[in-house]
């Protein structure tokens, strides 16, 4: 079993340790177990690759989690991960962390590759991470303002989602506003895996899809960037949600995609209210929403 110890580069060691505890000890994106089985990230059955989306890569710890927990033996199914981090500084740190951890990393930067780019070896137990210095949105192409907190990078977000309201007045950390490119999730999937009607193409429309979304208020836009065809491939998801309006919208999108409702037996949705981590008077409530077929 691989060692759970590794070194990451970060400007804020406390934030890195917090993320490590969330993912590696509490398994915040799954698998979570209850009386009806596992919720969130799981390998599932079959030999075909699992496609994982990491929306909100930050330091790259979730991709390292995949390496340590999903791709740790020759019997594990291969995993292709598409990881997105818009902030240039966080992106550079994440790419360094992934490569230092021995994760096969394909750096696409702020550009989409040509549709149907060839992917690497898909032997059992392999992991290939395609990283994009882009924000996910319902609409592709336009650049957006992004509020980056260098000493609290996990809380950075598209400026229009006002990530600064999480803190009380006078306690907001230093921030830098930058312009970042945007793309839709389905466009990114097509650019790496191929698209169209040929189900035997490398896209392999039967390949299952798992979504990890932690984007500080942009979760609805990320999910609206999926076509109905790609939604049908989603077997599971773990989404951090900020605010009741977004919770209702994500529930609606999942229901329309066939995930059912909460308490739906072996499938459906599970919603967990998170501890309130911020003291700002306008700070939204936080939930984790898990969905499974």
Image: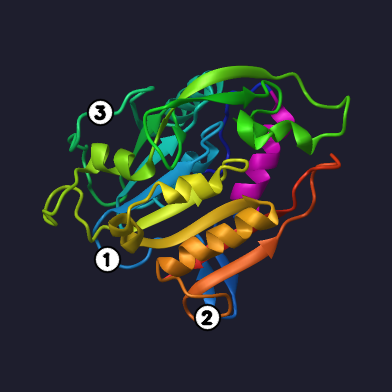
Q: Is residue 289 left or right of residue 81?
A: right
Q: Is residue 22 magenta?
A: yes
Q: Where is 119 relative to 208, above or below?
A: above
Q: Where is 232 relative to 184, above or below?
A: below
Q: Is residue 222 left or right of residue 82?
A: right
Marks 1 & 2, CB-CB < 8 Å contact: no
Helix, strand or loop at disc 2?
loop
Q: Quadrant of residue 132?
A: top left
| Crowd rating for badge 3 (residues with CA inside 10 Å; few <14, some 14–19, many 20+) | few
* Mark 2, residue position: 264
Helix, strand or loop at disc 1?
loop
Marks 3 & 2, CB-CB < 8 Å contact: no
Q: Is residue 11 magenta?
A: no
Residue for point 32% across, 58% down = 228
* Mark 3, residue position: 113
Residue for point 49% across, 20% down = 92
Marks 1 & 3, CB-CB < 8 Å contact: no
* Mark 1, residue position: 46
**Quadrant of the rendering where the C terminus is positioned:** bottom left
Q: Main secondary structure of the magenta part?
A: helix
Helix, strand or loop at disc 3?
loop
User: Is any part of residue 243 visible from this angle?
Assistant: yes
Residue for point 64% across, 37% down = 161
| Crowd rating for badge 1 (residues with CA inside 10 Å; few <14, some 14–19, many 20+) | few
User: Is any part of residue 213 visible from this angle?
Assistant: no
């Amino acid at each position: 079993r691989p060692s759970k110890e590794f070194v990451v580069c970060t400007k804020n060691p406390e934030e890195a340790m917090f993320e490590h505890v969330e993912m590696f000890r509490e398994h915040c994106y799954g698998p979570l177990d209850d009386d009806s089985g596992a919720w969130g990230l799981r390998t599932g059955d079959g030999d075909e690759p699992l496609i994982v989306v990491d929306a909100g890569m930050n330091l790259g710890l979730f991709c390292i989690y995949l390496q340590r927990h999903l791709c740790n033996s020759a019997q594990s199914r291969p995993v292709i991960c598409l990881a997105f981090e818009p902030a240039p500084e966080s992106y550079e740190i994440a790419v360094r962390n992934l490569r230092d951890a021995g994760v096969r990393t394909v750096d696409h930067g702020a550009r989409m590759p040509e549709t149907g780019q060839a992917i690497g070896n898909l032997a059992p137990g392999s992991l290939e991470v395609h990283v994009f210095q882009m924000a996910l949105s319902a609409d592709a192409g336009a650049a957006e303002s992004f509020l980056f907190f260098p000493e609290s990078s996990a809380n950075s977000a598209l400026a229009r989602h006002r990530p600064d309201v999480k803190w009380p007045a006078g306690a907001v950390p230093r921030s830098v506003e930058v312009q970042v490119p945007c793309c839709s999730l389905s466009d990114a999937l097509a650019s790496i895996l191929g698209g169209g009607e040929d189900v035997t193409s490398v896209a392999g429309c039967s390949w299952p899809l798992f979504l990890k979304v932690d984007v500080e208020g942009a979760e609805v836009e990320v999910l609206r960037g999926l076509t109905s065809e790609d939604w049908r491939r989603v077997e599971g998801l773990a989404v951090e949600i900020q605010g009741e309006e977004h919770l209702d919208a994500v529930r609606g999108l999942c229901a329309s995609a066939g995930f059912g409702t909460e308490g739906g037996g072996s499938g459906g949705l599970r919603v967990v209210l998170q501890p309130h981590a911020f003291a700002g008077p306008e700070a939204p409530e936080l939930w984790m929403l898990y969905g499974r077929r």
